[in-house]
Image (spheres, helix red, strand yellow):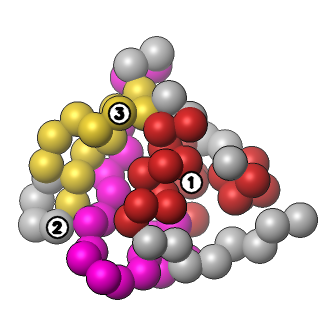
Amino acid sequence: MPELRELNYQEITNRLLKCGFRFYRHGKGPHELWVRDSDGRVVPVPHYHGKKIRKGTVRAIIREIGISVKEFMQL
């Protein structure tokens, strides 16, 4: 079973694209909003240049998407 780990911005956005999300707009500070048109779900994603996104933040993104950690990490 894939374990939850820190991911960089590119790894998260590639997985979001596979889940049907697209870039929507810039949010506050270094954040972006990604939307899935099929259900209108909006997910904020931090865009830290050169820094990994911590596990707790990755878990929060996964929770907002509505899939399991295992499914997300296998994408």
In this orientation, does residue 56 appear? no
Residue 18 is labelled as none
Percent coordinates x, y for residue 9 in the rendering: 39, 65
Label 3 crowd (10 A; few <14 / some 14-19 / many >=20): some
Please give the name of the residue rendered at 46% of the width and 16% of the height, measured from the top-left corner. Answer: 38
Percent coordinates x, y for residue 8 in the rendering: 44, 72
Please state which of the two labelled residues, at mark 3 or mark 1, is closer to the viewer: 3
Badge 2 or badge 3: first in the primary sequence: 3
Amino acid tagged 1: Ile
Amino acid tagged 2: Pro
Please state which of the two labelled residues, at mark 2 or mark 1, is closer to the viewer: 2
Quote the CA–CA distance across marks 3 and 1.
15 Å
Which stretch appears magenta? 39-58
Q: Secondary structure at mark 3?
A: strand
- Whether residue 75 sits left or right of residue 64 in the image: it is right
Amino acid tagged 3: Arg
Q: Which residue is mark 1?
A: 62
Percent coordinates x, y for residue 72 in the rendering: 67, 52
Please give the name of the residue rendered at 26% of the width and 66% of the height, measured from the top-left corner. Answer: 47
Q: Which residue is mark 3?
A: 22
Q: Is residue 53 above or below residue 58?
A: below
Q: Are marks 2 and 1 in contact (CB under 8 Å)?
A: no
Please give the name of the residue rendered at 42% of the width and 61% of the height, measured from the top-left corner. Answer: 10
Q: Are marks 3 and 1 in contact (CB under 8 Å)?
A: no
Quote the CA–CA distance across marks 2 and 3.
17 Å
Q: Is residue 62 above or below residue 16?
A: below
